[in-house]
Image: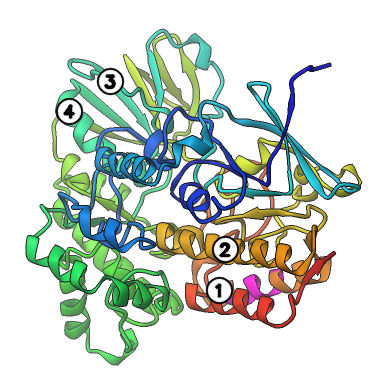
Amino acid sequence: MSTSKVETVDIVIIGAGFSGMYAIHRLRHYNVVCLEAGDGVGGTWYWNRYPGARVDIESVEYSYGFDETLQQEWSWPEYFSAQPDLERYANHVADRFNLREHIRFSNPVDSMTFDERENRWHVYTANGDQLTCRYVIAATGSLTAPNLPPWPGREKFAGEIYHTARWPAEGVNFSGKRVGFIGTGSTGIQAMPIIAEEADALYVFQRTPAFCMPSGNRPLDEAHEQEWKANYPERRKQMLNTYGASLVNYADRSGHDYTPQERADILEQAWNSKSAFQLLFAFRDVLTDAEVNEMVCEFVRGKIRTIVKDPATAELLCPTTYPIGGKRLCIGSGYYEMYNRENVTLVDARTAPIAAFTESGLRTSSVHYDLDVIVTATGFDAVTGAMDRIKIEGCDSRKLVDKWVDGPTTYLGAMTSGFPNLFMIHGPSTPAAQAQMITTGEWQVNWTADIIDAMGRDGFTCIDVTPEAETEWAQEVEMVSMQSLHRFADSWYNGKNIEGKKGGLMIYVGGFPRFAQLCESAVADGYQGFVRK
């Protein structure tokens, strides 16, 4: 039995990414401890150091808004910042607001149990820390738990294997090497053009082709930066009133309202707009009308066929089995052009699936590939993965992983019934990656902190949600998903990237303004759906 001293604190925050860092700042009038698995701050931007890692939201938007001085003093070098600049920003914020004094690094949470008599959580870390606290805030991130390759024989491979979500800080030397790259999602699309310039040969194992927009990245124009800084408070309010908490131009007319030539001109303008997601909002119904969506799909396929010189390769790169926007739209720089290089080979891993790792490479159902390095960009056990990997027991010793065995159930994406005083930021059934995550994370932390503050003022020590409220929220999530085309794509949005994972769409696609209004109304209406005692 452990003899470690049990510490008593008010709040434990799990994760020192951008939401967790802000939660420390917002709640520091309590005794707060943040437990972080890594040895630095930044969450996604700490772990994902692969070549080309870059945000796909303009950095003037993808940044904190809680402190005006911070907004004015910080300058971004590019429109879409690279990982080193985002990690540098996270460290600047941690230092500027003295957040590190609350963070315990390299100290992942192993398990936590709720004591119903005390209305307190008991939290245990892999390093042996034992804490008891009134509240836990899980800022564990939507894309945190890497999905490891499922194929057998990994231990046999004599070369180097890397997962993009656990990239060595010192980097990887690909010079003169034969590289196999598995995964053509957002990560692969960013990393591969850079690796291709260095490697002797690059074999791209594609299971599902991706829609990719040109990033439009360039050095940040000083006048653009100053214009934003002069209007930051107003811009932040505008962002929260848009579908994705981002100031792209949202069209108000249907794609059916235009002639074919007018549509082509609008789409061409969106493609060249240097605003990453403009193509999805070129018409008001791209994500809701299958016919309009197909118009946009075919426009992008035409771009692929124009850019990629080999017709057979171009056709393999054209997505045909899901709507554009159904999976997260990828943003790249030179991705399609990369396939015109003589040292790059596209392997169709759908018709000839990967079968196994071997001592010298990868074997598909039809061919063996000799490789020196294998890079796996096989994604994440998204949304629920990080929570599932912590042993969490709520009331009546019920395990969260058992409750969620058929898919996650929550109320407002913030809490799950039977697990009192446990709040989630960007949890299942929130807008999460459908909305700009720093700004919406700030909003969710503020909403959560206001509830915790009110608990103390009102003399309560325990807050839970009802099963009926979970059912109603599930109906809301399902209702808005039926109005969109997201349901027609297998992706990490619905867990279909993980074999055996159950449940429907785990992302709320009704837009951030509706989500925020429903959260605010529930609290204002006497904590509808909650139970306080």
Q: Amino acid at mark 3?
A: Val
Quickly name the residue at label 2. Answer: 430
Q: Amino acid at mark 1?
A: Phe
The front one of 279 and 115 is 115
Say the numbered circle drawn on residue 343.
4
Secondary structure found at label 4: loop
Secondary structure found at label 2: loop
Q: Amino acid at mark 2?
A: Thr
Q: Is residue 268 visible?
A: no
Badge 4 crowding class, 10 Å Cα cut-off, few under 14, some 14 to 19, many 20 or more, is some
Along the polypeptide, which appears first: circle 4 or circle 1? 4
Q: Residue at x 59, y 30 (%)?
A: 108
Alpha carbons under labels 2 and 3: distance apart: 36 Å
Q: Position of residue 81 (x, y in %)?
A: 23, 48
Residue 479 located within the stretch drawn in magenta:
yes
Q: Amino acid at mark 4?
A: Asn
Q: Residue at x 37, y 11 (%)?
A: 159
Alpha carbons under labels 4 and 3: distance apart: 19 Å
Q: Position of residue 496 (x, y in %)?
A: 58, 50
Secondary structure found at label 1: helix
Label 2–label 3 contact, CB within 8 A = no
Q: Residue at x 51, y 17 (%)?
A: 154
Q: Quadrant of residue 166?
A: top left
Is 154 above or below relative to 426? above
Badge 1 crowding class, 10 Å Cα cut-off, few under 14, some 14 to 19, many 20 or more, is many
Is 412 above or below relative to 47? below
The front one of 182 and 46 is 46
Quickly name the residue at label 1. Answer: 515
Give the magenta-colored segment's residue range. 474-480
Along the polypeptide, which appears first: circle 4 or circle 3? 3
Label 2–label 1 contact, CB within 8 A = yes
Quickly name the residue at label 3. Answer: 172
